[in-house]
Amino acid sequence: MAAKTAIWRGLLMAALFPLAAQAQEAVLEGLDYPWDIEAQGEVIYVTEKRGTIGIFDGETFARLPVETSAPILDDRGGGLLGLALRPDFARSRRAVVYQHMGTPEDRSNRVIEIELDGSAWIETRVLLDGIPGHPLYNGGRVAFGPDGMLYVTTGWTENRARPQDLGSLAGKILRLTPDGAIPEDNPFGGSPVWSLGHRNPQGIVWDADGQLYAAEHGQSGHDEVNRIERGANYGWPLIQGDETRGGMQAPLAHSGRSTWAPSGLAWEGERLLLASLRTGSVISVGTDGAVSEALSLGDRVRDVLVTEAYIYAITSNRSPRRDGASDDRMIRVSR
């Protein structure tokens, strides 16, 4: 019951975090299913699922195509998903993206490096391929950690065996070198797996002390925020919510029978900010598991970004279970 107690305790903390009362500014309209938002200095970069990365300098927005050696499959929940700017991006102009590919009948995912070259982003190399694909459960977040390594989240693909199988890349958080090699200090020799037992993690972030956290979609509720440790097993599909089992980790916080539909995750001061598709808000999660609403937006929130001056959020207002365009925006709130 600890996680549920923390949720209700967190509601009492809402007054300490007045973001919801601050003015919201839609700085970009007309986005179509954006998935990831990142920043380098004052410039914002946004992926759109169909295969573009937009560049916003505070006044203008340039939408550039991503040219890949294998076509991006923009179907249901798959497409061009996560984005991570390399730590040397200002010099190299290189980034990493998570790409859905194949056909609706035969899907997979891969992690590729791309370079900003004039009016397009060009694939330079494949860092990891053969990640199992699914219409909805692909994970899809990529991020460089404070250790300089590349972390990748993958979905369980609705296969109950894969999240607990160290031989499968599905249902995991993976850790690679920036060149796509397997680090020697990974917990399972010769494997990119950093942690296992995940259902559909779509958010990862580190706090100021370098502790990794992840957010993932649960099954009919029981969405989770987890404190991620090297080599740990987070239980899916064997446990969820307040359930326990030897050798498996309980979540820092979970939604119980209700649903957050969590996606992106950011660190802000002394708390996590969680993008919530179902509640139409940004949720605050404390390091003690306390949960409250940080910012009410009224849209399906896909990702959240914290800069020195602002909190940004992007929306994905179309469900991946439906077809058609998604009328989306980027929202900014002063910190």
Image (cartoon, rainbow, N blue to C red):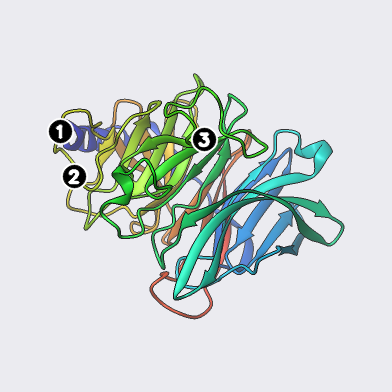
Rendering coords of residue 144 (x, y %)? 60, 35
**Residue in the image at 18% along x and 42% along y:** 239
| Quarter residue 84 falls in | top right
Kindly indicate whether the residue at mark 2 contacts the one at mark 1 (C-beta within 8 angstroms).
yes
Give the residue type that dot 2 points to.
Leu
The residue at which mark 2 appears reads as: 238
Label 1 – label 2 distance at C-alpha? 8 Å
The residue at which mark 1 appears reads as: 245
**Residue in the image at 77% along x and 57% along y:** 122
**Residue in the image at 39% along x and 44% along y:** 167
| Quarter residue 180 falls in | top right
Rendering coords of residue 11 (x, y %)? 26, 38
Residue most extreme to the top:
209
| The N terminus - image quarter | top left
Rendering coords of residue 77 (x, y %)? 45, 66
| Quarter residue 176 falls in | top right
Question: Considering only order in the chain, which callout, 3 or 1, is on the residue closer to the N terminus?
Answer: 3
The residue at which mark 3 appears reads as: 175
Label 1 – label 3 distance at C-alpha? 25 Å
Which is nearer the eye, 114 or 106? 106
Which is nearer the eye, 21 or 9? 9
The answer to whether any part of residue 283 appears in the image is no
Dot 3: few (<14), some (14–19), or many (≥20) neighbours within 10 Å? many
